[in-house]
Amino acid sequence: MAIDRMPELGQKPIALNVKLPAIADKGQDTLGDKLRALYRKREFTDVVLVCEEKSFPAHRVALASQSEVFMEGLRGETEGMQEVRIADIANPEAVKFMLNFLYQTSSEDWEDYNPRTQEINKDVLRLAQNFRLPGLTDRAMHWLAKDITTGNVVERLTICEDFGLAILREKILEQLTFNKQALAEVAHSAQIMQYPKLMQAMLQIAAGGVLESDAAHAKKRAKRA
C-alpha cells in the first residue's frame, strides 16, 4: 500500500540541528589545475602553434577563453588537430612564454621570467599585441624596466615607442631628467644631439616639474600671507 503523505512524528515540529563535515574541496585540483597538468603532459591537445618549425601543442578552449583573437581564429573547426602558424616571430621561446601566460601557470614561473635576450622579449611584446593580451604586455614591460642605464636607455625608449609602452617611457624620461648624475652624463654626451625627440621630451618634463614646483611655492606663500 503506497503512502501518499509522509507520517509526522509528535504534535509539534522540533528543529533538529544536523551537522555534516565540511565539503572536502581543499587540496583538490581545480579545473584550471587539471587543464594545466594536461598542457604540461601534452595530453588531449587539439591545436598546435607552429613558430619557426617548432610546435607547441595546446588546447583550443584554453586559448579561446583568454584571447578574443584566438577565439575568432579557432572558431568553427572542431575535429582533428588544428594548426596555427605564428608569423613575424623569430624566437619560438616567446610563444612558450605566451602559453605559460594563457594557461596562468604559477607565479614562480614568472618570477624566473628571463627571455635571455632583448629580441625574445620584443617578440613577447609582439605576441601580446597580436593576440590582445595586456597582461602579457605588463609582464614583458616589467622585465624591460630592469637594468636600465644611460648606455641602453635610447634602445629601451625606442622599444617603448614601438610598442606603445607609455607608462614605462614616462618613468624612464623622469629618471633621465631628475636624476642629476644621469642628466649630467647625457648632457655631456655628443650623441645626445642625434636624438632631438629625446631632448624635447626631457625639456618638456623638466618644464612641467618647474611649473609644479612654482605652483607649490605659490601655495605656501599664499598660506603664509
Image: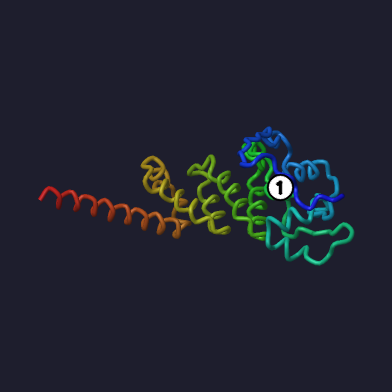
Q: Is residue 66 above or below residue 180?
A: below
Residue at (65, 34) in percent of width and height: 19
| Residue 50 location (% of width, % of height) | 81, 54
Give the residue furthest to the left.
225
* Quadrant of the image occupied by residue 142: top right
Residue drawn at 73 percent across, 36 percent down: 28
- Residue for point 24% across, 51% down: 216
Picture colour scheme:
rainbow
Query: Is disc 1 surrounded by few (<14), some (14 to 19) or many (20+) residues within 10 Å?
Result: many
Q: Is residue 167 left or right of residue 218?
A: right
Q: Nearer the viewer, residue 113 or 198?
A: 113
Q: Quick one: which residue is furthest to the right in this view?
A: 80
Q: Position of residue 43 (x, y in %)?
A: 85, 45
Question: What is the three-letter code of the residue carrying label 1?
Answer: Tyr
Count the labels in the image. Answer: 1
Q: Secondary structure at mark 1?
A: loop
Residue 196 lies left or right of residue 55; in this view the side is left
In this view of the protein, which residue sits in the foreground, 206 or 108?
108
Q: Residue 202 location in percent, x, y?
A: 39, 54
Q: Residue at x 56, y 46 (%)?
A: 144
Judge from the rendering whether residue 28 lies leftward or rightward of residue 223; answer left or right.
right
For this orientation, the residue located farthest to the front is 11
In this rendering, position of residue 224 left or right of residue 182: left
- Where is residue 192? Give x, y as percent: 45, 52
* Residue located beneath label 1 in the image: 103
